[in-house]
Amino acid sequence: QVQLVESGGGLVQAGASLRLSCAASRGPFNDYAVGWFRQAPGKEREFVAVVNWSGGLTYYGDSVKGRFTISRDNAKNTVYLQMNSLKPDDTAVYYCAATRDYATYDYWGQGTQVTVSS
């Protein structure tokens, strides 16, 4: 079983950058692709980005394409989400999750709050 813990969230102004981390403990982390999702108050959960087990394949949601970058360091059991040019619409709780098939995400972290002020 993989345990995931997010960190790096905070309060920033529009245009700023943040880097989120998703640290994994236990389990075969390298066997999983890892995705980032976000959920704003009153809205449905939204896919942000996913990276495959090696870090060589990534995919992004349309709303973050060109601004966010997902990467992973398997030696550190960590996945990162570099967020640039942040907008107030990026305000949400950000979650990382692990998947083997890109359809079902088996393990989720507790989330980290990102707030972008205008």
Image (cartoon, helix red, strand yellow):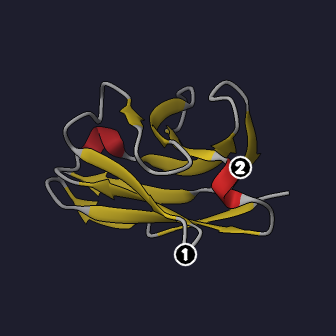
Q: Which residue is mark 2?
A: 108
Q: Quadrant of the N terminus?
A: bottom right
Label 1: few (<14), some (14–19) or many (≥20) C-alpha neighbours in 10 Å: few
Type of the residue with mark 2: Trp
Label 2: few (<14), some (14–19) or many (≥20) C-alpha neighbours in 10 Å: many
Q: Residue at x 58, y 49 (%)?
A: 95
Image coordinates for residue 118, horizontal then vertical, percent: 18, 50
Image quadrant assignment for residue 77: bottom right
| Distance between the alpha carbons at the discs numbered 1 and 2 | 18 Å
Q: Residue at x 52, y 28 (%)?
A: 43
Type of the residue with mark 1: Lys
Residue 77 in the image: above or below residue 40: below
Image coordinates for residue 6, horizontal then vertical, percent: 57, 64
Q: Would you say residue 41 is visible in this rendering? A: yes
Image coordinates for residue 98, horizontal then vertical, percent: 67, 46
Q: Which residue is mark 1?
A: 76
